[in-house]
Amino acid sequence: MALIQIKQVRSVIDRPERQKRTMKALGLTKIGAVKEVENTPAIAGMVAKVGHLVEVTEL
């Protein structure tokens, strides 16, 4: 599977608890945080749910 880079660009303040938990599960806790993860179907689904809070780059 390909790697993707996920960067948090917006805050989780005033977001539903479900979105906050998804961001934490992705390992993103602060604006500007960056994680490189494998692009699995589970990760792709999580990114889709919080797509308005993150930027995704394929590596």
Image: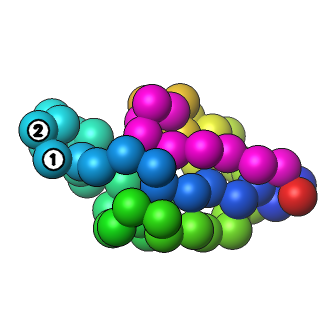
Q: Position of residue 12 (x, y in %)?
A: 24, 48
Q: Quadrant of the C terminus?
A: bottom right
- How far apart are the two marked residues, 1 and 2, measured between alpha carbons? 4 Å
Residue 50, visible in the rendered structure: yes
Q: Is residue 8 magenta?
A: no
Say which amino acid is labelled 2: Asp
Instruction: Assess disc 1: are there few (<14), some (14-19) or many (≥20) residues with their C-alpha within 10 Å of its C-alpha.
Output: few
Q: Secondary structure at mark 1?
A: loop
Give the amino acid at mark 1: Ile
Looking at the image, residue 24 lies above or below residue 19? below
* Disc sitting over residue 14 in the figure: 2
Q: Is residue 39 above or below residue 31?
A: above
Is residue 10 shown left or right of residue 9?
Answer: left
**Is residue 29 found left or right of 58 in the rendered image?**
left
In terms of secondary structure, where does tag 2 sit?
loop
Q: 47 above or below 6?
A: above
Residue depicted at x 46% and y 49%: 9
Identify the residue position indicated by label 1 in the image.
Answer: 13
Task: Identify which residue is drawn at 60% across, 44% down.
Answer: 55
Q: Kindly identify the residue that appears in the image at 50 percent across and 33 percent down.
A: 51
Q: Could you tell me if the residues under marks 1 and 2 are in contact, i.e. CB atoms within 8 Å?
A: yes
Quarter of the image where one finds residue 36 = bottom right
Asked if the stretch drawn in magenta spans residue 54, the answer is: yes
Q: Position of residue 57 (x, y in %)?
A: 76, 49
Question: Which one is nearer the viewer's eye here, 17 or 52?
Answer: 52
Spot occupied by residue 41 in the image (x, y as percentages of width and height): 67, 40
Q: Is residue 1 visible?
A: no
Query: Which portion, as a residue range, is magenta?
Result: 50-58
**Within the image, what quadrant is residue 19 found in?**
top left
